[in-house]
Amino acid sequence: MNHTINYISLKGENQRRQILFIFEDARPQDIAVHICNRYIYWTNSNTKRPTIERARIGSQQREIIVESDLGMPAGITIDYVTQRIYWADIREGIFYRLESTNLVGQERQIEFEGIHTEPFAVAVKNEYLYFTDLRRNSLWKYDLAKNSPPLEIRNFEEKPMGLIAKKENIKTLPDCKILQEAYHNYTKPVIEKFQKIEVKNSSKKLECINGTLQDGLCRCTRGFTGKFCEISLCHNYCFSGTCHLTNQGYPYCHCPKGSGGTRCERDCDGYCLNDGDCRFSFPNARLPTCVCQEGFRGLRCEGSVITDKLCDVYCSQESRLEHNNDPEYTYCKCSRRSYVNVMDNQSPQALLSTSNSSNFVNYFQDPVFITMICITFTVLAMCLFLTIYILHLRRKPMPRIKRRYIVNNKNSTSMTERPQHPEQCEITIENCCNMNVCETPCFEPSKLQSYHQSRSDDKKMLLPNMERTEDMY
C-alpha cells in the first residue's frame, strides 16, 4: 500500500491497519518474519537500487544486508534449521535466480539460475525450496541437496501470489525456546465478557451491505464496490459461464466448453466442420482450435483423409493419366508421381500443381507472370538508355585551340612599310594578308624556320616563299 509495510494487532478489538515502515526510495515486494530473534526481512524491488533489508521488530532502523548484483528481487523466506534466508530474483531478459545468505547477509551463494520463469513467492521446507511462477501460473519444487532442475508440481487458473510452508519443530531450536512459553500462555482458557449496549435510534446510521463502516465510510470486502458496497464486481461481467474473483479482487470468467475470451464473448458455434470438437486453448485466444474426428484433417476439419486415400488408389492406375484433362475426371488431378485432391483446394495454383506436398507452380507458364517480367525488363532498359543520354549531354565539349604569334619588336613599323635589309619583321600571321593579296610580304619568325624546314611537303606554303608569286598564284 503506497510503499509501506503495515501490520494489524491481534490483541484487543482495535484491528485497524497500522504503518510500520514508510519508504520513499524503496518498493517493498515481500516480507519474512523471524519470530525467534524478532527480525523482519523484506525485498526492495526498486530497479534503480534493489536491496535485501531487515529491521528489528519495534525499531525504525533499517539495515541493508544485500545490495550488489540484484535484478528485481521478489519473494523471500527464512530457513530456521540452516539459519539462512532465500529469495527469488528476476534478472534482465529471460533469466532468474534463486539465492541465499545467512541471516546477516554473508556467505551468499547462487542456488539455481534458469530461464523463461517469473518467480514470485518462495518457501522452504526440509531440503526443498518451493516457488511460484507468474508466467505459467504454476508451483515449482527445487531440491537444495541434489541441485537438480526444478520440478513443476501444480498449475493454477490464476496467478499464485502467496506461498507458505508449515514450520515444524521450530520450538525445539535454541533460538526459539521463547515460543514454548508463548504457546502455553496462548493456549490458556479465554474468559469472555459481554456488555449489553443500548443503541440510540436518534441518529441515522450508515449501513454497509458488504463491508464495514470506518471513519464514516464503507470499506467494502473483496469483490464489491459502491457507496454501500452493494454492487458486485461479477454482476453482468461474463457473457456465459461463471464469474470468480482473483486474489487481488478482480473478476474473471470460467468459460464453458465451446466459448472463450476474457468475458466468454467468443463462440465456437459453426466453426469446426464435420463434427469437430471446438476448443479455446487459453481464455484470451482469438481463434479456437478444432480437434477433428477420425478421417478428417485441417484447421477446421474441412479435409477428408478417406478422399486422399481414394485419390491415391485412383491415380495409381496408369490409364487414369489419359483422362487428366477431361472435365469428367476433375476430382483428383493425377500425375505420374503423385496426385492433387482438387476438391479441397480449387485455387489455380493447386490445379496447375503436380505435387500435393510441395504444391509447386510453374510460373513461366503463367501469362501474367511473363507479362510482368517483360514490363520489368522494358523499364530497366529505358532507365539505362536515359542514364547514358543524360551523361552524354552533360559532357563538356573539347576547347578549340587557336595558334597565334605575338609580335614583340619595339621598332615595329606599319604593315605597308617594307623593312630594310637585313631586318626582319615579325607580325601576327592572321593580320598579314587578311585573306587578300599581300602587298607587303610576310616573313616568318626566325624561331620557327628550323621547325618548318624539316617538313619537305610544306616548303611551298612557308612564309619565306611568299615572294615567289608565280608559285602561289
Image (spheres, rainbow, N blue to C red):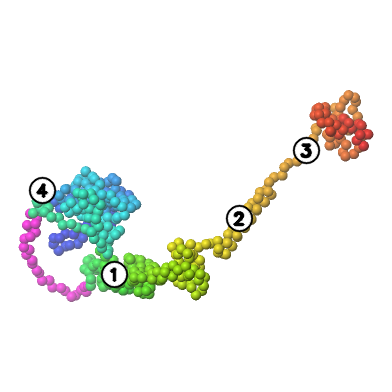
Instruction: Please give the residue where the numbered disc 4 appears in the rendered image.
Output: 174
Q: Amino acid at mark 2?
A: Leu
Name the N-terminal-most of marks 4 and 1: 4
Q: Secondary structure at mark 4?
A: helix
Name the residue rendered at 23%, 59% in the picture: 153
Instruction: Please give the residue where the numbered disc 1 appears in the rendered image.
Output: 254
Q: Which residues are magenta?
A: 181-207
Q: Secondary structure at mark 3?
A: loop
Name the N-terminal-most of marks 4 and 2: 4
Mark 4 vs mark 3: give the one in front: 3
Instruction: Please give the residue where the numbered disc 2 appears in the rendered image.
Output: 380
Q: Are marks 4 and 3 in contact (CB under 8 Å)?
A: no
Front residue of 213 and 76: 76
* For residue 190, side relative to residue 261 (left or right): left
Name the residue rendered at 11%, 54% in the picture: 169
Name the residue rendered at 32%, 49% in the picture: 48
Instruction: Please give the residue where the numbered disc 3 appears in the rendered image.
Output: 402
